[in-house]
Image (spheres, rainbow, N blue to C red):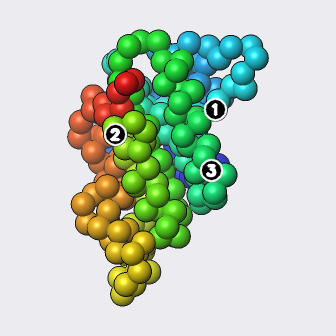
Amino acid sequence: MAVVNGLSRCVSGGWRCPKPEFPFALLPSRDLLPGFHPSPPTEKVKKVDLALLVGPGRTLVTAKWSIRADREEQFMSDFQAYERLESAGQDFGYVLITNEFDAARLRAACERRRQNAPLFTQVVHISPAAVGVVYRDGGAEGASAVRGHIASGRLMSLEAWLESIAANPRQTGQGVSRS
């Protein structure tokens, strides 16, 4: 929850972050998000940590300080529920924000796929520069892959992500198609 609280403070203009010109919402459940059907009464309601709403664009954000094995499975099941209940017939973004430092888990988050596309539109780290320092000399396959994801921008900083949203808020909901 610390990540979400900090992010909401940053998005709302605190902490010397750029203040984007678009609405965001901390939502108790995805059922309150425009463009999604309510969950069936027999199904557990999925909660969204943060939603960015720009015109028809929607980005669902899951914020996890660390990524445990059970959360790795939860990411896919949550996405499948969002995809199944999407009602607007439009793409939506699915972003992971984390402070995880385990190379294998970061690599998995960056490379996890659903059908023919990455599961996450973006993978955002609180400090990828710190991750780069931790793994700068590591020769293991996971460390090398993480360095590659940082270099390519697949694993991006929170600051860079917020700047990209502020620069082009209409892009927030693009990247994850329903198919």
Query: Viewer-nearest of labels 1 and 2?
Result: 2
Residue 157 tag number: none
First in sequence: mark 1 vs mark 3: 1
First in sequence: mark 3 vs mark 2: 3
Residue 71 tag number: 3
- Tell how many labels: 3
- The Cα–Cα distance between marks 3 and 2, rounded to whole angstroms, is 20 Å
- The three-letter amino acid code for the residue at tag 2 is Ala
Residue 162, image x, y percentages: 35, 47
Query: Viewer-nearest of labels 1 and 3?
Result: 3
- The three-letter amino acid code for the residue at tag 1 is Lys
Q: Do the residues labelled 1 and 2 touch (CB within 8 Å)?
A: no
- The three-letter amino acid code for the residue at tag 3 is Arg
* Residue at 59% over, 60% down: 66
Q: Is residue 145 above or below residue 37?
A: below
The residue beneath circle 1 is 47
Q: Residue placed farthest to the right in the image?
A: 42
* Residue at 39% over, 23% down: 178
